[in-house]
Amino acid sequence: MFMLGFPLLLVPFAIYNIIAFLMPGVSWTATITSVHMMSDADWTMSAGDMLLVLSILLLFGELMKSTRIGLRSVVDHGLSLLLFLAALVEFILVRQAGTSTFFLLLVIMFVDVLGGFAVTLRSAQRDLTVEGVAS
């Protein structure tokens, strides 16, 4: 119940902004760790990759939350839409947000907004009952 009314994608959005504004020298594409694979390839992970993985996992939680029906679900969708709009404005106007990592985070937020509304509308159609006319 603690997740109600809180857009989960606010977490990666906040992490991005904290790192971008408080640690300006940090690169989103620099390798953080590397794993040597059995195929002799080296799989490298950057800070941007890890943030996007976190965002995708939280997107799953957001989509699970959108299956609820009620006023809290509407508030959740409204907050997700406001978060997306704030991120879009930041992407357009703020220099530090002009990265591919932030753009992909923005796309994940857009999928959250569209997917949340679509799932809610589809669920609401199933809950609609029409009383038949007695013959």
Image: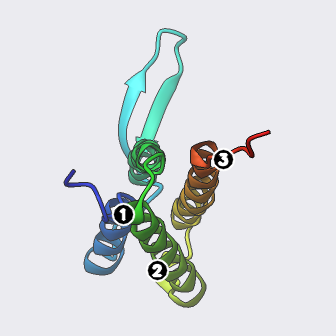
Question: Is residue 127 or residue 15 the one in the foreground?
Answer: 127
Front label number (3 vs 2): 3
Disc number placed over residue 72 in the picture, else none? 1
Q: Which residue is drawn at 47% across and 73% down?
A: 78
Residue topped by disc 3: 131
Whether the residues at callouts 1 and 3 have beta carbons within 8 Å, the answer is: no
Q: Left or right: where does residue 73 sit relative to residue 102?
A: left
Looking at the rendered structure, the number of numbered marks drawn on it comes to 3
Three-letter code for the amino acid on which mark 2 is drawn: Gln
Q: Between marks 3 and 2, how big is the CA–CA gap?
A: 56 Å
Question: Is residue 71 or residue 34 the one in the foreground?
Answer: 71
Whether the residues at callouts 2 and 1 have beta carbons within 8 Å, the answer is: no
Q: Which residue is drawn at 28% across and 73% down?
A: 18
Q: Between marks 1 and 3, how big is the CA–CA gap?
A: 27 Å
Q: Residue furthest left?
A: 2
Which of the marked residues, 3 or 2, is nearer the chain's N terminus?
2
Instruction: Count neighbours of disc 2 (C-alpha within 10 A) and say few if under 14, some if 14 to 19, many if 20 or more.
Output: some
Three-letter code for the amino acid on which mark 1 is drawn: Arg
Determine which quarter of the picture holds residue 2: bottom left
Q: Residue at x 65, y 48 (%)?
A: 125
- Please provide percent x and percent y for residue 22: 25, 78
Disc number placed over residue 96 in the picture, else none? 2
Circle 1 sits in a helix, a strand or a loop, which is it? Answer: helix
Disc number placed over residue 86 in the picture, else none? none
Determine which quarter of the picture holds residue 25: bottom left
- Please provide percent x and percent y for residue 30: 42, 53
Q: Between marks 2 and 1, how big is the CA–CA gap?
A: 33 Å
- Please provide percent x and percent y for residue 71: 40, 65
Q: Residue furthest right?
A: 135
Q: Residue furthest top?
A: 38
